């Protein structure tokens, strides 16, 4: 082979090796601002999170049961002061089986036109797979009517079982894959292993850039006797037990593990992360802001969880209290073992009394977490002269 050919091959090999050794581009982070009523806590959270966020995805309108949009009033001045672009999210009830397509397109255009300079429109429509052909048709009309305004949607993992998903994806500029879902009373809200499988499958399916919606919240769900979902409540703050209800929460460590895997081995066409939702100081169902920041930035999630007893208002009894002395939220422990001498006891706030090998334990009945520098009573006990300390079981 001539010398010049050897030189050309060597240059190509060097370029390939350099590309292989190049670190992947950092993932960008967006956040959903999902409040229907804005308050000072939301505005404060915007200001404290601007350095983390590329774009705000703001709930701008939501359909009612008839398909008519109710428009909300986000604080435009606060959003403008943040200096970050705003994507307007329109949520369409996933249970709608019929809609007036022309009217709905016109309503979405009116939302866009009311907000000059919006960075895009996102449609959040968690429909069943049978509705995907109609959804694709609607999105095609909407995209044409929007012109140069970028159009994105949220997508469900369940849609990947349908061939009709391709038509939906082809109609939009970008998709946000939700990997947090209420599937069954026992499946939980988030599973990092399952989420990664969904992401990899979606990456193989999508031909356009996509983002992944990660959870930093918890919710209370209720089921009927046949295991069908009947209610989802994201504002209730007190954990209680019950046969037909479950408290589901996304553990910071689990979400951080998935995020690390996406940083280290990003799938093709992954454009970034969208967080649901922006934490505020009065949102007890979301992680605290320091915890969210730690997960986003990859900071260590050092836990400082302890359990202690204190005098109860009930004579002869002691209250059992969990305390988080760390700077990040921690998942509620699976169980707290009580001293053997605790003949009478009971659990509260997501814990129930159980017996294991004849010994009393407070078993976690509902998922959740304890915010940084907070404490929570989880039960009470009468232990007689037994002065042994309760013990956390992770």
Image (cartoon, rainbow, N blue to C red):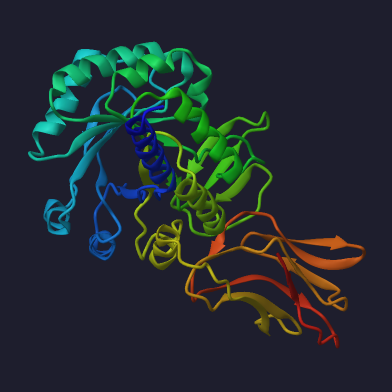
Which quarter of the figure has residue 294?
Answer: bottom left
Does residue 311 appear anywhere in the picture? no
Quadrant for the C terminus in the image: bottom right
Q: Residue at x 42, y 18 (%)?
A: 165
Quadrant for the N terminus in the image: top left
Q: Position of residue 225 (x, y in %)?
A: 68, 32
User: Image height check: is 388 above or below 375?
Assistant: below
Tally the marks: 0
Q: Position of residue 228 (x, y in %)?
A: 60, 30
Left/right placement of residue 64 relative to residue 297 reads left
Q: Residue furthest right?
A: 357
User: Image height check: is 53 above or below 290?
Assistant: above
Q: Position of residue 219 (x, y in %)?
A: 51, 48
Left/right placement of residue 127 relative to residue 322 reads left
Q: Residue at x 85, y 62 (%)?
A: 355
Which quarter of the figure has residue 2?
Answer: top left
Does residue 377 appear anywhere in the picture? yes
Q: Position of residue 94 (x, y in %)?
A: 40, 26
Q: Residue at x 16, y 57 (%)?
A: 78
Left/right placement of residue 142 relative to residue 115 reads right
Which quarter of the figure has residue 191?
Answer: top right
User: Image height check: is 103 above or below 394?
Assistant: above
């Amino acid at each position: 082979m001539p010398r010049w050919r050897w030189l050309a091959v060597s240059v190509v090999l060097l370029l390939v090796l350099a590309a292989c050794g190049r670190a992947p581009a950092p993932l960008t982070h967006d956040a959903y601002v999902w409040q229907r009523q804005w308050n000072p806590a939301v505005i404060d959270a915007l200001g404290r999170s601007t350095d983390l966020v590329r774009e705000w995805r703001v709930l701008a309108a939501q359909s009612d049961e008839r398909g008519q949009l109710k428009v909300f009033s986000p604080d435009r001045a606060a959003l403008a002061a943040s200096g970050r672009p705003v994507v307007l999210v329109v949520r369409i009830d996933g249970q709608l089986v019929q809609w007036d397509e022309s009217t709905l397109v016109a309503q979405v255009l009116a939302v866009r036109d009311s907000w000059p300079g919006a960075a895009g429109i996102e449609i959040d429509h968690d429909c069943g797979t049978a509705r995907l052909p109609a959804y694709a048709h609607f999105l095609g009309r909407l995209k044409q009517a929007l012109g140069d305004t970028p159009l994105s949607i949220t997508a469900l993992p369940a849609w990947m079982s349908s061939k009709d998903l391709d038509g939906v994806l082809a109609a939009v500029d970008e998709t946000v894959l939700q990997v947090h879902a209420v599937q069954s009373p026992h499946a939980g809200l988030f599973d990092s292993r399952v989420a990664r499988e969904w992401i990899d499958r979606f990456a193989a399916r999508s031909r356009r850039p996509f983002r992944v919606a990660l959870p930093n919240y918890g919710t209370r769900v209720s089921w009927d006797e046949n295991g069908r979902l009947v209610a989802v409540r994201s504002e209730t703050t007190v954990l209680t037990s019950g046969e037909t209800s479950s408290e589901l929460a996304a553990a910071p460590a689990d979400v951080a593990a998935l995020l690390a895997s996406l940083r280290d081995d990003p799938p093709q066409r992954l454009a970034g992360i969208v967080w649901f939702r922006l934490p505020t100081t009065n949102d007890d169902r979301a992680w605290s802001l320091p915890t969210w920041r730690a997960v986003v930035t990859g900071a260590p999630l050092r836990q400082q969880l302890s359990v202690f007893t204190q005098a109860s208002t009930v004579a002869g009894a002691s209250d059992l209290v969990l305390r988080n002395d760390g700077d990040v939220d921690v998942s509620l422990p699976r169980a707290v073992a009580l001293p053997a001498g605790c003949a009478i006891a009971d659990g509260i706030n997501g814990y129930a009394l159980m017996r294991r090998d004849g010994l009393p334990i407070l078993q976690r009945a509902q998922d959740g977490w304890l915010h940084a520098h907070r404490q929570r009573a989880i039960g009470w006990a009468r232990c007689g002269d037994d002065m042994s300390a309760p013990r956390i079981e992770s």
